[in-house]
Image (tube, rainbow, N blue to C red):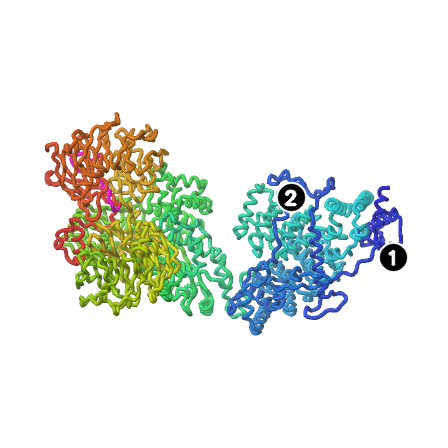
Amino acid sequence: MVIQQQTSLIVDSLPFTEDSYSTEPASVFTTIELSAKEALDPSSTTHGRSISNGIAAVFIEHGRLTPPPPPLRHCRCDSNSSCDSDHNPAPSLRIRKRDKVLKAIRYITRTHPKAPSGEPKKERRHFSDKSSRSSSRGLAVARQDIFPQNLSAPVADTAVPKPDGRIETTPQLALCSMLLAEHTALVSVCEPSEKVVDGAEEPLQELPTDNNEVSLTNSDEGLPTNSTEEWLKAQDHVEQDRINWLISKMVEGFVEDAVKDSTAVAEVVHLGPVLDRELYRKLISCLISEFDQSLILDVELLQGLVQLLQCASPGYLVSDDLIKILSMLRNRLEKTHKRTTEHQYHLVSAVAHVLDVMAEHGVEDLSRVLEHEPLSKVLASLKGSSDPYLMYQASHAFQALQYVPNDESPLDALYRYSLEVADGIVKLSAITQFRLPEVMKGLGILLKTTKESYDFASSMYETASAVLTNGQSVLEILGGGTGYGHQKLWYSAVCAARMFARQGQLAELNQLICQAPCRRDPLFQWGICQLLGEIAADSIWTTTTRQQSIDLLEELYKNDADWGRDECVQDWMVAIVRQLSDSPDDAVKSRALALLQDLNLDQSSVIQHPYPLRNGLAMPTSSPILTKVQDIPYLEYHLRQIQKKRLEDTQTVYIPPQAKASLRARDDDLFPLMEKVQEFLASERQVMLILGDSGSGKSTFNRHLEFNLWTDYKIGGPIPLLINLPAIDRPDQDMIGKHLDMNNFSKVQIQEMKQHREFILICDGYDESLQTANLHKTNLLNQPGQWSAKMVICCRSQYLSLSYHSRFKPLPVDRYNSNNVELFQEAAIVPFSKDQVKCYIEQFSQHPRTKLLFGDRPVWSAEEYLEKLIEIPNLMDLVKNPFLLALSLKALPGLADSNNDLSVVKVTRVGLYDKFAEQWLEINVQRLQDSKLSSEERATLDLLVDDGFIPRAISYLERLAASIFKEQDGNPVVQYSQLSDAGTWKEELFSQDPIVKHLREAGPLNRTGNQYRFIHRTVLEYFYSRVIYSPPKKNAETLSQDLGNNTFDAPQTPPLFDVNGPLFHKSLRKEPSVVQFLCDRTQQNPDFKQQLLDFLELSKTDPTASQAAANAIMILIKSGVLFNSADLRGIRVPDADLSDGQFDYAEFHGADLRDANFTRSWLRCADFSKAQMDGVRFGELPYLSHAYSCAFSFNGSLLAVGLSNDGIAIYDVKTWTKLHSLEGQEQCVLGLAYSPNNSHQVVSGGSDGIVRLWDSVKNELLFAMDGHTGYVTAVAFSSNGENIASASSDQTVRIWSSLTGQLLFTLEGHTAKVTGLAYSPTGQYIASGCSEGTIRLWNANTGAPGPVWPSDPASPILCLAQSSDGQWIASGHKNGEILLRNARTGVIGATLVGHTYRVRGIAFSPNSQWIASASRDHTVRLWDVLAGTLVSVFSGHTADVTALTFSPDGFQVASASEDHTVRLWEVSSSGNSSDIQKRGHTGFVFGVAYSPDGTSIVSCSNDRTVRTWDVSTGAAGSFSLRLASPIQVAAYSPSGQHIVTAGTDDNNITLWSSQTGAATGDVFSGHTEPVKNLVYSPCGDWIVSVSSDRTARLWGITLNGTGTEPGCILASNQTELTAVAFSPSGTHFVIAGTDDFVELWDAQTRQIVATLQGCGALTYDVAFSPRGEQIAIGGSTETLVLWDGKSSTPDVELHGHTDRILCIAYSPVSANGDQWIASGSLDRTVRLWRHKPSDEPNYWTCVSVVKDLAVSCRRIAWNPNPTPGAAPLEFVTGYQDGSVRVWRVVEEKDGKIFRVCLVWNSSVVQLVAVDLTTKGAIGLSNMNRHLLVQRGAVDCH
């Protein structure tokens, strides 16, 4: 009864026509049921009908439903002709059809379907609930907003050429052709209009595009870019014809070419969318023929064929094409490739695509017998394949086949449904007017009564249930593709999804995935997953879209209850993500890897995807056909081969290096080098210099940079070239052409590239090629008609002088144009950090080659490697060099095998190379033994192995290295030709003789063609150093005579006096790496050190040993050997590098020192009498007296000096003789300047306020320009010399005519005294600065004011300068800072910090590379402008430095000071900041102290560092700290286990472990101002500290050395406390301060015992005598006071110092009872006072004075454990120049005379020549003689 009621409702809703008749409900349903059974019955007359058609037939027969109209088909006519045929729709109808299809798809995705409760479930496979999938997903459905919006249809990122440029690639050609053909359509899209389609107004631009449509834009709005518009405007009919001709010739060339590789196929198929019908037909016929004739399956050809089919325009295809292709594919599936799953996969995939095209183009005449049924059978069988990928493709193809006979594609069906003319159940639902409950129950009866219709009814039941649940219409649901017969809903849905993806409608794709009624179908899920994978893998999409695709996969996998019920789908999703984890796109790869890690899957269960995720041929990466057509001989093809080869090169372990802005930049201001290079390549700069030490990773970085550039290479883009400079003959001439010629490019290609292409040059080995030329300039790069290139060039930093920029820096075309862009950039690679070392080890431990080092043993893990590195002392510092790190890791297994305790192993640089060479040869000998050799080669190898292969190989490599240096002057690349080099030295080393061949092939050599070189420059230098000295070998064997003449004997130590050896014939001054290896040998092998010393002795009697002696003494000095008190009389060391040598009291009497370099040498008390000193260099020049200001003439020959005694002197720079005196300046000369166009004219300004112009030759005053009301602070000439500017304390700048002396302008605006001014290089404007901190710019021609740049008023400007290139204005400030401003904008570019007091003078070098600054801190500092870093510090002035100037050649700086001297400094002799840091402190040394055992010294400085030193050698200790503030004091604890420090900023006292350098964790806090001094009690339980906060505090120390409670306040005075000392017994301590008092305290009672006054206003230091009975006091007077601590007056006053006493110290009591006091004073002397037991109690004698003319001693300490006996005594001093010096007291002449000799000096920052004698010296220039006298030398006549 219920059924009848429901059925009556259905019938009531039927839309009867006028001629229809009524029927009873029951009879209607019965008819439906019978019709359905009849349709299923094989004997039924409705044979061939589907169930749905059978049901629909009932209604058609009863007249309840009008038969559907004929299906619509695409027009097959030519697109250019009109079509009026009945079977083809008009264009507007086709547009309407597409729009309706789109509407139908949108209806499908409108609402969210929910599965009804209790619905039947059909499980294909058992579902495995993986741990990564949420167990609480319930009925959740994936999010629909992962793709938040629709995009434009994805297109390849192809840019149009420049308007006058050449088309470089085929994709570019296709784009240009389409732009020209569719230009009118493009305009209509850009300016959309509303068009009426079938009575409805709808925007045309919303219509989806056809498959062959390509986007013409790259913006969201669909508008063409500016470059596209420009290109289109530049085109004419000639260019259009040329493009069409290129396309035609390309197709013809492809058809005619017998070989059609994958590149050619991809290239020509890419033209498919723009081909006309004739060319398309020619190309498709060619591809069909090629495929038909191929014997094996060519997958690329097949994909190209399919892709060409898919892009066919209407009318281009005929049925025969498609049927023939389908037939060929079926035949191969049935026969040829039946057993090959991979081939079946590709064939079935092609079948599916071909069938889609057939359905789309309305192919109806497919033979059911010949084609349809056989193909159905094949596909049906493959649907059951065990390969899930093949199964899905077969199912997809099977579904596509269902549409071909019915001439209806899935999208056509959607359109038909939207017109409500669907058949089957759609008609039934339409009749019922969507009264769905009745339909549901009717279907339920069908399900029960018709067993055969189970599949159909269940799917319909599921569909109807969804309708009931969410209210969606059956039309909408079935519009998704619920079909008839075998047509499945999932296939139509997948097709719709792909259409959405093609058109960029990703938001609608997202909704379709979530709402499709077939979303539970595994095949639908499989197809969607594949689509998402293709989107994620395809670079045509944006990175964000690709990541969103992965996100949607993750969402479906983890959070969607319906997704992945079939386990195979789960595996498929994981396989897709796994394949994406190998994506070359880092963002996609990272997202996929993160998802895999999040899923935490069981790897064994994952199906690996054997086929790539792509939807057709990839974009062609090269265009050989186009290249050939354009008559370019395969240029891009050739480049492609080069690219492929470079990308195939094996990449070694690589850690991206860090770098700093220059060699002198701070080590804590770092950046990734690769990022900086990429910035350079994107900028307008032309040259980037990369510097680094040997082995720092420059070459490795270059290879990686080249790899990245080739990876990113785009056709027509910049060409990367890695050029090995040593391999090119004369790289200074046509370097690019030579390199291309070596790589087999033709002359035509080279010329083409020179005219049309850009290059990125990566020039490696500038130093190895022995270059001095500027390669950018000599190769005329970027000049008109020359090569266009950017240059990245690498060089070892050791090989460059200070002024190296001139070798690399390109000059701007117009040097005086202030708008010039800086063309040069540099970076310096820094050593590895600890983290980088760890990363390198991790990669190295996993590298396959590492296994070779361990043989059969387990390979160490990264943690084990790191443990070994840390265990070996100091090795971690050594391995910060990447190459040494690699050597260490290779050598460690061998070291571990031969040493049980690695903590006692001493590893040096040369030791690593020794081990590396041995292991390399061991591994390669084994490789040779395992190789396939001829009988002769095998016999020779066996003989070599038996007699000692490794020693022979080392001998061969030494011989090779020696020959390279002898014959090629060190050029590392050897080119060998068997014919050309017959009979030369090369034949011996590179012939095919079996012995030579084995030794060569086993060595660390690389071969490229006929070029050979060591694997690294340092390996060559290592073997060359072995030629000079090799460690002795034990049991060295000799080869038998059977080996013939080609023997290489085992290496022996070279004969000591081998006159043919390298030491005798080659200067090693330019080979610092070789010298470093030899320095290591010197430190390792005392015998070698002695041999070098013997060379010095030999040179005294043998003149032929002079070169050897010069090399020997250089090696000894560089290895740290000190020549203090050395007997060097008569040695011959001409041209020796003795810089940084220490020669205190050395004897050079009669020595040959011609052309020797003594820069920064310590020559105190040295004897040079009768020495040959022609050409000797000291790195400094003499100073001039009574000077206050200075200026060089423009030709550099003269120096004008403003005198402090009212005058001007003119000096000849070469001879340092006074030429002229200009008198008439009544007061001090404050400013001087030479005219730029008249070398005789000098302008001066001074305290009298008058500006004077002089003729310096005639000694004539030309003009006295009076007008200022204050003193003149600065003067300057304009660039043309016609005007003079003067600045004054009267707050004005005045401009005068140098021709007439008349005042031209008065520039007013400053509100304080004007302290500096500078003309621009062009003379157009003047910059002035004043003490209020403001810089003003003025128009120099009109006097009009310009921009005003304020700065900090708290730091007034004291001086100003402008760079010669017009880019920078520098200002010196009162706070010691220098500000660099952009001369155009005033923006501060850098702040130079280093001076400790005000900057009073500043100057740019002529090339604008350097800034020199003068300061009140008595120093001149040199700065790097680009890096903004300190280069060098020149010390020597003893008062404020007031002015300075560069010489015109930039090699000298002259500085004037209030010490009334002008000093000249050689810029080329200054060291860089990193060198200074290696030598020691860079600031004042405030504290020095010995360790209790007397073996170590600790020092602290205002450079914020604490260092330790070995007492005997001066070598740096392991303890080193860099803190946040200057360190005022540092001391050892009495136990020696701790070091205590106190800084100036944090007011705290900190304890450190003296062994590890780690903080103990205890900080003593309490002082409110800086701690000035502190002292341990002798027992170590207490510390007493004094501070600027006017308090003294007592701190308790626990047994383990750490602090207890906060220190109690012992004293609180009205004045600052400065000094403190504990008595030796620990019972008392003394404190002193700034108010003329010294207090003695009882340590137990903490009470004052006694007080002393009268020692001066300020006490600097106090010290107890060894027995505690006396206290020494030094202060602001010149008297050293001794006090017994009892009386109220001093006991002894010691006189001798001429200035305040800064530091004092008692020595321990010597064995003979003598007592010593050392005192240091501001008078730059240290005095030694002696008291003998036999003397009166208070009698002390000054027995020695140690003088220093430049700096004062700040702290003194005696060694607590001197050598037993009366002498020697030893003490240490710390100085203002940052040096720490150890001295030894030597007794002479029975104790009546004492000599204080230097033991070592931590850093010699300037020449020291106090008490040097040159009596009778030969060839010493007057200039140098004058210099030495000024430095304190005696007997210099």
The circle drawn on residue 18 is 1
Q: Is residue 1769 magenta?
A: yes
Where residue 1749 appears, x then y in whole percent? Answer: 19, 48
Q: Residues within 10 Å of mark 2 (few under 14, many from 20)?
A: many
Q: Is residue 866 left or right of residue 959?
A: right
Q: Quadrant of residue 817?
A: bottom left
| Outermost residue, top side | 1645
For label 2, the residue is: 560
Mark 1 or mark 2: whose residue is earlier in sequence? 1
Camera-nearest residue between 543 and 628: 543
Tell me the residue at 57%/41% (across/down): 600
Q: Amino acid at mark 1?
A: Glu
Camera-nearest residue between 286 and 199: 199
CA separation in Å, label 1 and label 2: 51 Å
Where residue 1503 appears, x then y in whole percent? Answer: 30, 45
Q: Is residue 768 magenta?
A: no
**The residue tagged with tag 1: helix, strand or loop?**
loop
Residue 144 visible within the image: yes
Where residue 53 appears, x then y in whole percent? Answer: 80, 53
Image: 417 above or below 847: below
Looking at the rendering, the stretch of residues picked out in magenta corresponds to 1761-1777
Q: Amino acid at mark 2?
A: Asp
